[in-house]
Image: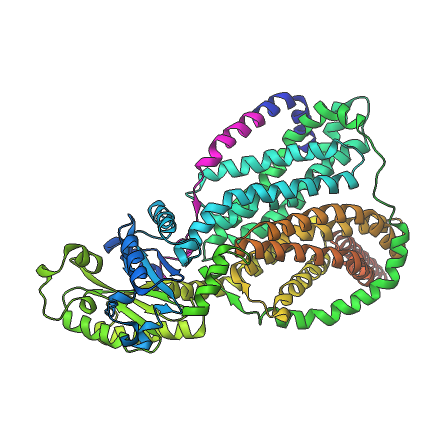
Amino acid sequence: MIEKLSHFIVRKRKMIGRLFIIALFLSLIQMPLVKINYDLSEYIPDTEPSKQGMNQFEKEFAMQGFARIMINNVSLAEAKAYKDQMSKVDGVDTVIWLDDVTDVARPIEFISQDVLEDYYVDGSALIEVMFSEDDYSLKTNQAITEILKIIPEDSNMIGSSVDTKSAQDTISNQIAKIMLMVVPVVVIILLLTTNSYYSPLLFLMVIGTSIILNMGTNLIFPHVSFITYSIVAALQLAVSMDYSVFLLHEFEADVSEDSEESMAKAITKACSSITASALTTVSGFVALAFMSFTIGKDMGFVFAKGIVLSLLCVIFFMPYLILKFYPLVEKGRHKSLIPNFERFTKVLKKISYCFIAVTLLLAIPSYVAQKQNTFLYGTASFGGGEGTKVFEDEKKILAKFGRSNPLIIMVPQGDYVNEKALSDELEKMDVVKNVMSLTSLVAEGVPDSFIPIDSYQKFRNENYSRMIVYVKTASESKVAYETVNQVKEIVQKYYGENYYLTGVIPITMDMERVINEDYNKVNLLSILAVMIILLFTFRSVVLPVILISVIEVGIFINMAIPYYMGIPMMFIGYLIVSSIELGATIDYAILMTNNYLEFRKENEKHKARQFAVNKSIPSILTSGGILVSAAFLIKIGSTISAVSEMGGLIARGALISMLLVIFVLPYLLILFDKIIMETNFKAIRERRKKHLRKLIYKAHERRIKHLEKEKIRKQ
């Protein structure tokens, strides 16, 4: 079957090549049409209370973006003037400042210090803005741009809307920047590990095509998350480059005058190995699709599709390119720059025992430590990274005014007595900065008909009244979560369960609960999927356990490092990186094990270990070096903290997995050699056959003895 397909690919290569080129141009046209989603709350299940509140709020009013602006070196009168200018910006709904709670025309000495310090400190005024649309709308984005034109250059601005605008403004540029860094590094690694100057260009043409096909075909999804969009190209390049390298090596190993026949043989040989490698990677990504927090589905399907497209490009498109450009590859031959690792494999025996001892000592503490990490779950983990203006602005505003986060409450309209009582009780909470509602802004007893229509529509419609409660907490903290629970208790006192509560903090709370439930499920599915593939690959019961154990220990060590460094981790990154590290780096272990088993057929185990390490190291260094480099460049190339952190985790994880496969796995194969040889499916079948032959022989002997006894008895 594979041989027929191989000959078909070679025979029809020009037609296949044209089809891929057409698909490439179509994908280039489609790429700008793919929608990028910056709203993480989109991925929370609709069954969660905060998502229900958000959906209901969007239906009754409109979700609103939020920003905090600090204007420095201004008087009260100047700050009031800036506030008035911002209020007139299209897309701005409400601007809140000191003049909403006191008369700023009075001398500053007559204003309560408690009130003053929330809005004006050391000549800096803090103004809070609610936009008429959500954080992700074009109108909000444009409103922020207009506000930046109004306020002085040394002003500071933060908030969920600002974070979103920052990500939207930088993400496309950053992808280009990351790829411009990744591609030269990959070319250098390939030049060092191949023997032609033109081979890297051939590989980049193939994988580059698959990346563009993947980016363009993302149009089949309603949208793609900005995290997925930021890193998928670099990771696809890093993870799937091996497939093209392997096919070219197979072709060059048996190239003859009949290049078409050589290519058909190369495809036949490479197809099973490349497919098995791709399947382990795809299985890790597909496991993410089972997350309740559906960003896993977003990332899982896009990444898995990318790997499948890379596989298809290598098997179907690359033969056309190799046969077309191979004379150029031949002209660019150079001496291989990779040294022979035979001497290293001898030295390895001495230092590996130390490495194994260290690994064993780290395994259990790392497993425990990685479960003790401090995690970030919500939008706080997706802001600008260190060195960005957003990051610096946040530090400056928090230093002077502390934190402020809006909670949005929606209660049935009509019961003004309860509404006023609720507003007053919430206002008395120490952690509450202020409460914005119609009952807090309008004197008691004023008829609805006397209230300006703009003010009325902001806080009431025919079904609901809304309140905005500003709390002085971070979006992710124990105090923030306790505050939300207290607010719920107070609201329930007046309205029972007939209310809706949403905002960054409630959304983060629900996100944390959903993601925690996903953790064990995703890890277990990733391991089971890879385990099944390894069972069919090696036809062994023991080998899958050994290989997965090595990579899992690497994951534990990788994830324990942030705990020992006291650095909080983005939880979604923890989940996703674990699956990526298992799916992508298990290939190194498969390669080492395949080589060991191959050499073990004709050599004793220690010799087989030495040959396997010597043969495997160049490929592992090439593949691992590309993945580590690409992921590290994502880390340093992205100013979005979530994307940067994921890059760092993947880079470190891949490096740890490489070291474990080179230093630890070969000795585990030696240690369990007897069990491995006795528990592979072939050995088990042979033992069963042998056992069955023995049973048949014994039964035959018993039958003969029985017949002899019968013969004697008859005589």
Camera-side residue of 438 and 147: 147
- Residue 281 vs 332, above or below: the answer is below
* Quarter where residue 175 is shown: top right
Image spot of residue 90 (x, y percent): 28, 47
- For the C terminus, the quadrant is bottom right
- Residue 539 vs 179, above or below: the answer is below
The majority secondary structure of the magenta stretch comes to helix
* Quarter where residue 222 is shown: top left
Q: Residue at the location (62% across, 71% down)?
A: 369
Residue 33 highlighted magenta (yes or no): yes
Range of magenta residues: 20-48
Residue 557 highlighted magenta (yes or no): no
Q: Residue at the location (29% across, 67% down)?
A: 98
> Quick check: can you spot residue 580?
yes
- For the N terminus, the quadrant is top right
Camera-side residue of 481 and 676: 481
Image spot of residue 621 (x, y percent): 76, 48
Q: How is the image coloured?
A: rainbow
> Quick check: can you spot residue 699?
no
